[in-house]
Image: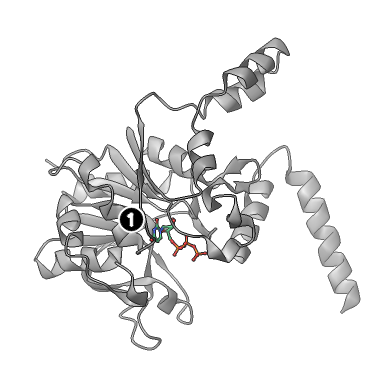
Amino acid sequence: MTRKVTKAIFPVAGLGTRFLPATKSIPKEIMTLVDRPLIQYAIDEARAAGIKEFIFVTSRGKGALEDYFDNSPVLEQELKRKGKDKLLDVLENTNMESGAIAYIRQHKALGLGHAVWCARRLLDPNEPFAVILPDDVIAADKPCLQQMVEAYEELGGGSMVAAMEVPADKVSAYGVLDVEEDLGHSVVARGMVEKPAPGTEPSNLAVIGRYILSPDVMQNLNQMKQGAGGEVQLTDAIADEITAGRKVYGHRFSGQRFDCGSKAGFLQATISFGLSRDDLRDELQEYLDELSAVRAAAQ
Ligand code: UTP
């Protein structure tokens, strides 16, 4: 039987340069989609998938992220005193169980693979673990990681990455799967390559920021191989699993993924999440209609 996935690593040590100057002082993961920081979406998704322990790989300047997970007794008392029960609920739902969160530092941004490796001592050497990149936000009826955990348990182990079909002219910006067998929602990978040169992509199935990894991947990371962009790539350590004869699956999740690590993706997510909210939909839609009318009139 496959071991349950109960620990997740959240690599949040990147520099977030695409959001400068904001990221001079605000961690990217604290930036808000409507009224919740990106990290809250990631935590909620992990909880829904049965994750009990949350490991953050952080870096200098990420203090606001650590503070976010502290309880706020003064604020809670004030909301209680004023009878603002709904807001109190919102606040209390963000509270984390004592000891459920661990922080570890990545001293230098040497790549995603290196960030994941930094958490090695906090994992059980026999247990699979999840990795969530908070800047990939996925809107889905059933949260993406939960879909993956279910598929992973059904397939009986190995490693699994979230996968999504992307247009041919965009695929070389991603880790890309070489597909050996298509099982429907999941595929068996024959290989994986990070940011292939345009024209050399093995498929248009791109890897998105959700992973369930066998502990062997951590062993592979010990080799600290430098990959694309001179960084230690997680994709390469997963691809080494295939070379070693172990199973790696891609899972085509249901849902819409937003690349909130990019400005355009973040804006699209803001509009989409705004439109999905009962308290904002009408006003926002009205504004969008006005904008299209103005554009149409100008053409
Ligand atoms: P990105 O490639 O988006 O890099 O990292 P970044 O630094 O966050 O942002 P830009 O490109 O400078 O704007 C993908 C994920 O991997 C983490 C990031 O925090 C992000 O969650 N990461 C990346 C690390 O934790 N450490 C690294 O060395 C690199």
Query: Callout 1, which amino acid?
Result: Ala
Residue 134, position as x, y percentages in the image? 46, 51
Label 1 belongs to which residue?
115
Residue 272, position as x, y percentages in the image? 64, 53
Rendered image coloring scheme: one colour
Q: Is residue 156 above or below residue 162?
A: above
Residue 225 image-quadrant placement: bottom left
Taking the image as shown, residue 61 lies to the left or right of residue 154, namely right
The reply to whether residue 89 is in sight is: yes
Mark 1 neighbour class, 10 Å CA radius: few under 14, some 14 to 19, many 20 or more? many
Residue 221, position as x, y percentages in the image? 20, 60
Q: Secondary structure at mark 1?
A: helix
Residue placed most toward the observer, 275 or 66: 66
In the image, ligand 1 is in what quadrant?
bottom left
The reply to whether residue 51 is in sight is: no
Residue 251, position as x, y percentages in the image? 32, 58
Q: Quadrant of the N terminus?
A: top left
Q: Is residue 91 above or below residue 139?
A: above
**Residue found at the very far bottom of the displayed protein:** 199
Taking the image as shown, residue 141 lies to the left or right of residue 145, namely right
Residue drawn at (51%, 49%), measured in percent from left and top? Answer: 61
Taking the image as shown, residue 89 lies to the left or right of residue 288, namely left
Residue 282 image-quadrant placement: top right
Residue drawn at (52%, 24%), measured in percent from left and top? Answer: 71
